[in-house]
Amino acid sequence: MKVAIIGAGLQGLCTAYYLAKAGVEVTVLERNSGPALEASFGNGGYLQAECPEPWNQPGILGALPKWWWSSLGRNRKNAAKLLRTTELLRLLPWGIRFLRASNAETFFRHVALNRELAQYTLECMAALRRETSIDYAHRACGSLFVFRHQKALEGYAALLDRLGDNGAGWQRVDRDAILQSEPCLRPIGESLEGGIVFPNDESGDSYRFSQTLAELASRSGVQFEYGQQVSGIAANNDRVSIRAGTHEVRADALILAAGAHSGRLAACIGIRLPIAPAKGYSLTIPLGDWPDRPRHVIADAGVHAGINVLGDSLRVAGTADFCGFDMRIDHGRIDYMATLVEAVLPEFAKQMDRSAIRPFAGLRPLSADGLPIIGATSAPNVYANTGHGGLGWTLAAGSAKALADQISGASLAIDLAPFSPLRFGG
Ligand SMILES: Cc1cc2nc3c(=O)[nH]c(=O)nc-3n(C[C@H](O)[C@H](O)[C@H](O)COP(=O)(O)OP(=O)(O)OC[C@H]3O[C@@H](n4cnc5c(N)ncnc54)[C@H](O)[C@@H]3O)c2cc1C
C-alpha cells in the first residue's frame, strides 16, 4: 500500500512515522524546505494532557464582542484575543458550529475525549523515548495554573470538579504553596489568589521532536518531498492523485495533515472540514545564567500567557488572532508578548537580552467543535489528521498512532469514532 501525506507538521510526521513502522510505503509532500516550519515550530511546548480543554467553553459567546472590540484601532495593542471585522463574515459558518459546541454538555464530553487521546499520546511518547532514545528536551514537570482573581480560580476549580471521574489529576494550591514551589513567581506573589497544579502534565520541544522524527521516519523508508506545494487532488475508488508543484503523485490513499490549510485542500474534493486559522505568537528567550528558572509549565490565567522552559530557553506563548491566513509577524503583537514576560517574570524581564529574543507566529488549526478530525473522510481513500487547534502537540503522537493502526488494519487502542471527519459530513 502506498500512502501520500500532505504536510510535514507534527500530525503529518507522526502519521508517516507510525505508518512506515507498520510496513506502509509513505511519501510526505511539504511546501516548505524542511519539517515542522509552521505551527509545529514555535508552540508553547506544553503537553496539556490532564485537562485538554477546547476553546468552545460555555459562555464563550459573551466574550466574542470583547475580542472584536479589542481588534479595533489602538485597542489592538494590549489584547490577548483579536477578531478582525474582515473575518466576521468569512468565519460565520465555522463560528455557528463553534458556538453550537459550546454548551456545557458538549464541552465536558469533548474535554473527556481529548483527555483520553492526550493520555494515549503520553503513552505513545514514552514508548518512542524507550525505543528510539529521541531527545526533545522532555520534562515530566507538571503544570501550574495561577489566578489573579478569586472568581476566575473558583470558576476553573468548578470546571475541574464537574469533570469528575473523567477529569484530571489536579490539586488546588494557595499562594504560599505556589511561591514555595515556584520561586520565580515571588515578585508577583501579592497579585496571586491561588492556583491549580496538574502533576502529570509534561513539556517538550516540538520542533526538536519533529526534526528527529523526520530522520527516524526517513530511515524507515518514508520519502520526503520538500518544496512541493499541493494545488489539486482527485480521488476515486482505485487511487488518489495529487498535483504537487509541477508533477503528479499517485497513491492508494491520501492523508490531509496540512494544519490550518487542510480545510481549503479538502474543499477541492468536496469534503467539508470546518477548520479556522487562529494565529498565535511565541517568544524564545535565552535563559542565560538566570537562577530561578520555572520548574513547571506555568499558565497565568490573569494575563493569558503560557511560560515554559525548553532546553536553555524560555518559551512564552499566547494570543489568539482571528485574522485569516496572514502569517506575518506583527511587531505590535511581539511588543505585547514582551509585556507578558514583564507581567509574569518581572525580574527575568529586567535582565533578559532583548536582542536575542526569537519571535514566532503560527496558525493553530482550530476545528469547529474543539475535537481533532481524524479518520476516513467521505471521499474514497482520503483520510484526515488535522484540526487539533491549541492542542496539536498534546494530541499528536496518539492521533497519528491510532490513524496508522486504522489504515494498516491493526487493532486500535482508542476509539476514533468521536473524531471522525464524517461528523461534519466531510
Ligand atoms: C503560538 C502557538 C502556541 C501553541 N502552543 C501549544 C502548546 O503549548 N501545546 C499544544 O499541544 N499545542 C500548542 N499549539 C498548537 C500546535 O502547535 C498545533 O496544533 C500543531 O503544531 C498543528 O500541527 P499540524 O501538523 O496540524 O500543522 P502544521 O504544523 O501547521 O503543519 C502543517 C504543514 O502542512 C504544510 N502545508 C499546508 N498546505 C500545504 C500545501 N498545499 N501543500 C504542501 N504542504 C502544505 C505546511 O507547510 C505545514 O508544514 C500552539 C500553536 C501556536 C501557534
Image (tube, rainbow, N blue to C red):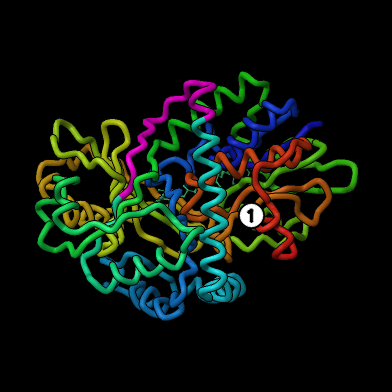
Residue at horizontal 77 percent and vertical 48 percent from the top: 382
Residue position marked by numbered label 1 in the rendering: 373
Residue 385, percent across and down? 64, 48
Image x and y of residue 126, in percent: 49, 31
Residue pushed farthest right? Answer: 238
Relative depth, front residue between 189 and 329: 189
The image quarter in which residue 252 lies: top right
Indicate the position of residue 90 as horizontal and vertical percent values. Answer: 57, 71
- Please state which of residues 425 and 191 is positioned toward the viewer in this rendering: 191
- What residue lies at 34% left-to-right and 55% top-to-bottom? 318
- Residue, x 37% and y 70% (percent of image)? 158
| Magenta-tinted stretch | 127-143
- Whether 62 is among the magenta residues is no
Q: Secondary structure at mark 1?
A: strand
The C terminus - image quarter: bottom right
Q: Amino acid at mark 1?
A: Ile
> Can the viewer see residue 258?
yes
Of residues 92 and 104, the one drawn nearer to the viewer in this rendering: 104
- The residue that appears at 75% across and 50% down in the rendered structure is 376
Residue 73: percent from left, percent from top: 31, 74
